[in-house]
């Protein structure tokens, strides 16, 4: 059962991108608003490339991308204003403290400084970084840096939040705290897209899952829908993923 009663946060049609060979070739993808969506696929399937095109960091060769109805190719600034992108290795200015970093990012978005300071307070409390607000980021653990980067991604109150492998390298407790933050962002009305190789994360967290392979969307749906499609009822997402991404997978 598809859930497209809510508006679409992301609508992709016919997306194509080649480097020395085609990576994405005719990708169609719909993601409804207010969900946590996990984008899966084998190594090199083009997940990061797709999401970089959505975030306006790579130019598609063909196709269309709409973010909450905003055409990201015609109106890149309008699309960026409602989108946050968190790469797998977020870049922080590590000589800055979290408060300074957030003020800097807010400045790039030309936010009103008083409003930005309020938002920074709220985010730093929410992400449990308040005690470290004036400490330079350079000494922070990877998980803390990830959370500062997440705060930076959220400071301009984007509707769509895209995170590339947000849990890589985090210990169990930090991973839990990032997962909780993402879930509460969805509960607060945001749409969150994550890529992950940790299938258990997709299995437990995602409202819907999309699997990319061969440059296209191979399958999408809830875990149960994917299992139905793969004929792996009662089996794990890993079994389902392997079934759907092997060369004789069920055609989309
Ligand atoms: N800037 C680039 N120049 C040349 N090739 C690139 C570039 N970016 C990506 N590629 C190639 O595009 C393909 C898809 O890469 P991409 O990082 O999008 O895959 P992915 O699904 O995110 O993979 P992974 O799961 O391993 O992170 C790979 O073969 C990669 O080498």
Image: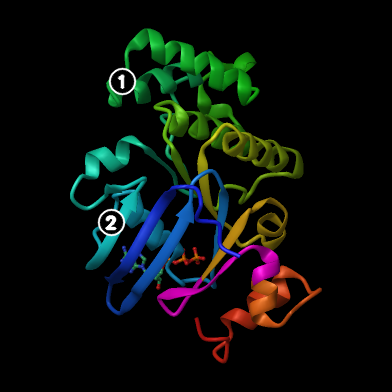
Q: Nearer the viewer, residue 211 or 67?
A: 67
Query: Image check: 210 left or right of 106?
Result: right
Query: Image check: 252 left or right of 198?
Result: left
Query: Image check: 224 left or right of 83?
Result: right
Q: Which mark is residue 65?
A: none
User: Which residue is found at the position 39% from the left and 18% from the top?
Assistant: 103
Where residue 62 sits, quadrant-wise, is bottom left
Q: Which residue is mark 2?
A: 58
Mark 2 nearby-residue class (10 Å; few <14, some 14–19, many ≥20): few
Picture coordinates of residue 41, whole percent (x, y): 54, 70
Picture coordinates of residue 89, whole percent (x, y): 48, 47
Question: Eyeballing the image, is 127 above or below 194?
Answer: above
Q: Which mark is residue 107?
A: 1
Magenta residues, as a range? 212-225
Where residue 228 sits, quadrant-wise, is bottom right
Q: At numbered mark 1, what does the secondary structure look like: helix, strand or loop?
A: helix
Where residue 83 sits, quadrant-wise, is top left
Picture coordinates of residue 21, whole percent (x, y): 30, 79
Specify which label sits upstream in the sequence, 1 or 2. 2
Q: Residue most toward the right? A: 234
Question: Eyeballing the image, is 23 above or below 9?
Answer: below
Q: Let me know if residue 52 is in the magenta part.
A: no
């Amino acid at each position: 059962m598809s859930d497209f009663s809510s508006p679409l946060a992301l609508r992709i049609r016919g997306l194509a991108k080649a480097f020395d060979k085609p990576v994405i070739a005719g990708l169609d993808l719909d993601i409804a608003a207010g969900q946590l969506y996990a984008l899966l696929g084998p190594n090199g399937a083009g997940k990061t490339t797709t999401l970089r095109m959505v975030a306006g960091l790579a130019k598609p060769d063909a196709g269309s991308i709409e973010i909450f109805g905003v055409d990201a190719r015609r109106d890149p600034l309008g699309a960026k204003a409602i989108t946050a992108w968190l790469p797998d290795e977020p870049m922080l200015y590590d000589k800055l403290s979290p408060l300074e970093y957030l003020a800097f990012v807010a400045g790039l978005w030309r936010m009103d400084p008083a409003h930005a300071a309020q938002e920074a307070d709220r985010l730093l409390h929410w992400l449990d970084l308040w005690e470290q607000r004036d400490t330079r980021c350079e000494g922070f653990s990877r998980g803390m840096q990830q959370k500062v980067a997440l705060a930076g991604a959220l400071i301009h109150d984007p509707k769509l939040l895209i995170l590339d492998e947000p849990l890589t390298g985090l210990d169990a407790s930090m991973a839990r705290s990032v997962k909780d933050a993402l879930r509460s962002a969805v509960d607060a009305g945001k749409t969150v897209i994550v890529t992950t190789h940790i299938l258990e994360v997709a299995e437990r967290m995602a409202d819907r899952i999309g699997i990319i392979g061969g440059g296209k969307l191979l399958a999408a749906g809830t875990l149960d829908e994917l299992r139905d499609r793969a004929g792996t009822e009662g089996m794990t997402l890993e079994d389902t993923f392997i079934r759907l991404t092997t060369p004789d997978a069920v055609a989309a």
